[in-house]
């Protein structure tokens, strides 16, 4: 019998997880049961994906660079990637701004709702800690460059949030391999190749757990989700973000079609499991191993391209997040009657661009950086907590959706960069054996 494709297995896991979450929430002990007995499996899955992320980035990036003919091809990949990433993020922010300024979701929020949301959430520990985290960061304009350079590689390897430092080291390592006598470096090439294969196989093995893990993750999200009535009051704001995210996905599909001549079905089918995991985990960093596997093996992007474009994208390219930040910042300003000039909108474009580079690829990170966007337009510091309280209740579902856009955007850029360099292959790479051959 033909095996059900992975994305369908994951979809079934998700649907059953939602149904189970709804059912069990009707019992008073339901939430506790899910936390004690179901949620741990989702947590284990996310830990395994994170476990594999750093070794995977290191081996595949070193392999990708050391397989190149010369350094100039790497420069080509690097420059194109960064330029396209900046452009797509600016497109995302512009779409967000256009939508929120036309639909004006903030103007209809009644003073009672604002009061209620402020009372319920403004003192919430996650909001106060978000503000603390964002305002503590006294950063100069070039601090992101300084932070990218590691001073101790073991410290970088030991911290998942220092992925850019690992990328930096891997690039320096790969380039140095290219620069020395090929005879001397041959054993190392073989070692890195072998390690890379093993790690890819580990991704395959971890993915066997995916349908069960998404069941656990979604059951937990549903069982711990709060007051649905409040969600309804924020519906118009939520819908504005969702329309923006949908436009972004359509934009990606169009670009893939125009640049690579590939159909939307081909693209979505290729990366669907990564999108579904992005939705279930709300973390592009945790999804990264799967994104890399799908883009390389199913879309035919050469490892030389995907090994650079995807890890860099997971950390610095977050179109969904920056679109959401633009909409959320203006929504808060509209609801709290904070006047905005045209220049403020331009400031939002710039800070949301920088914020998406600075946001960690983990759940809820976009909200921390939103504080920085709000501060940049002169939003009063004593009202920050009220502002965040307005959007807090609906943040998790929006986080799930914007993470899908973040991951889809990175995958689209890999296809475009690969196509432009003649590195988009038609056939699946046969570099590693599928799990079915086990
Ligand atoms: N959760 C998002 C990601 O990992 C970041 C955010 O928007 O909060 O891509």
Image (cartoon, rainbow, N blue to C red):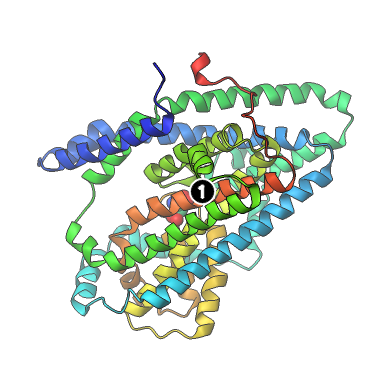
Residue 257 image point, x, y percent: 59, 50
Q: Nearer the viewer, residue 281 or 430?
A: 430
Rendered position, 345 above or below 209: below
Query: In the image, is 96 to the left or to the right of 350?
Result: left
Residue 99 screen position, x and y as percent? 42, 71
Answer with left or right where residue 405 lies relative to residue 185.
Answer: left
360 lies left or right of 309: left
198 lies left or right of 175: left
Circle 1 is placed at which residue position?
408
Label 1 crowding class (10 Å Cα cut-off): few <14, some 14-19, many 20+? Answer: many
Q: Is the CB atom of the residue marked by disc 1 within 8 angstroms of ligand 1's nearest atom? A: no
Q: Nearer the viewer, residue 89 or 184?
A: 89
- Whether residue 122 is visible: no
The residue nearer to you, when weighing 391 against 204, is 204
> Where residue 117 appears, x then y in whole percent?
23, 68
- The residue drawn where x is 43% and y is 63% is 244
Q: Tell me where residue 172 sits by quadrant.
A: top right
Q: Which residue occupies the foreground of this view, 229 or 364? A: 229
For residue 429, say whether it is visible: yes
**Does residue 192 lie above or below 371 as drawn?**
above
Q: Quadrant of the N terminus?
A: top left
- Location of residue 23 in the rendering, given as x and y in whole percent from the top left corner: 15, 39
User: Is residue 284 depicted above or below 112 in this figure?
Assistant: above
- The residue located at (82%, 26%) in the rendering is 185
Q: Residue 18's image quarter?
A: top left
Q: Secondary structure at mark 1?
A: helix
Give the residue at x 49% y 68%: 95
Q: Classify residue 189 by image quadrant.
A: top right
Total number of numbered labels?
A: 1
């Amino acid at each position: 019998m033909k095996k059900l494709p992975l994305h369908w297995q994951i979809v079934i896991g998700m649907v059953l997880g939602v149904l189970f979450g709804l059912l069990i929430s009707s019992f008073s002990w339901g939430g506790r049961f899910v936390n004690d007995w179901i949620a741990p499996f989702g947590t284990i899955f996310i830990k395994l994906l994170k476990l594999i992320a750093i070794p995977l980035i290191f081996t595949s990036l070193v392999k990708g660079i050391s397989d190149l003919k010369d350094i100039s091809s790497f420069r080509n990949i690097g420059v194109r990637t960064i330029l396209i990433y900046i452009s797509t993020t600016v497109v995302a922010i512009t779409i967000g701004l256009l939508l929120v300024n036309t639909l004006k979701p903030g103007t209809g929020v009644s003073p009672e709702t604002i009061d209620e949301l402020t009372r319920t959430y403004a003192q919430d520990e996650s909001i106060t800690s978000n503000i603390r985290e964002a305002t503590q960061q006294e950063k100069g304009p070039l601090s992101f460059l300084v932070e990218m350079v590691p001073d101790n590689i073991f410290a970088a390897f030991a911290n998942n949030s220092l992925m850019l430092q690992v990328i930096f080291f891997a690039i320096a390592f790969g380039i140095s391999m290219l620069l020395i006598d090929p005879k001397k470096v041959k054993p190392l090439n073989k070692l890195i190749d072998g390690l890379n294969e093993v790690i890819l196989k580990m991704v395959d093995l971890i993915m066997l757990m995916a349908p069960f893990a998404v069941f656990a993750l979604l059951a937990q999200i549903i069982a711990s989700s709060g007051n649905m009535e409040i969600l309804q009051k924020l519906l118009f704001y939520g819908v504005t973000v969702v329309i923006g995210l949908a436009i972004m996905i359509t934009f990606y599909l169009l670009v893939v079609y125009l640049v690579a001549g590939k159909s939307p079905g081909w693209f979505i089918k290729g990366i669907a499991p990564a999108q579904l995991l992005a939705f279930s985990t709300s973390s592009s960093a945790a999804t990264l191993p799967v994104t890399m596997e799908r883009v390389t093996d199913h879309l035919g992007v050469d490892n030389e391209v995907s090994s650079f474009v995807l890890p860099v994208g997971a950390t610095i390219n977050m179109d969904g997040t920056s679109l959401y930040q633009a909409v959320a910042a203006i929504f808060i300003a509209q609801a709290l009657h904070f006047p905005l000039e045209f220049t403020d909108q331009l400031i939002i474009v710039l800070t949301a661009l920088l914020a998406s580079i600075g946001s960690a690829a983990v759940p809820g990170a976009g909200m921390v950086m939103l504080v920085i966007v709000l501060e940049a337009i002169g939003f009063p510091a004593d009202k920050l907590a009220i502002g965040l309280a307005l959007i807090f209740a609906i943040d998790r579902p929006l986080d799930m959706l914007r993470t899908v856009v973040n991951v889809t955007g990175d995958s689209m850029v890999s296809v475009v960069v690969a196509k432009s360099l003649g590195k988009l292959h038609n056939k699946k790479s046969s570099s590693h054996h599928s799990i079915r051959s086990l």
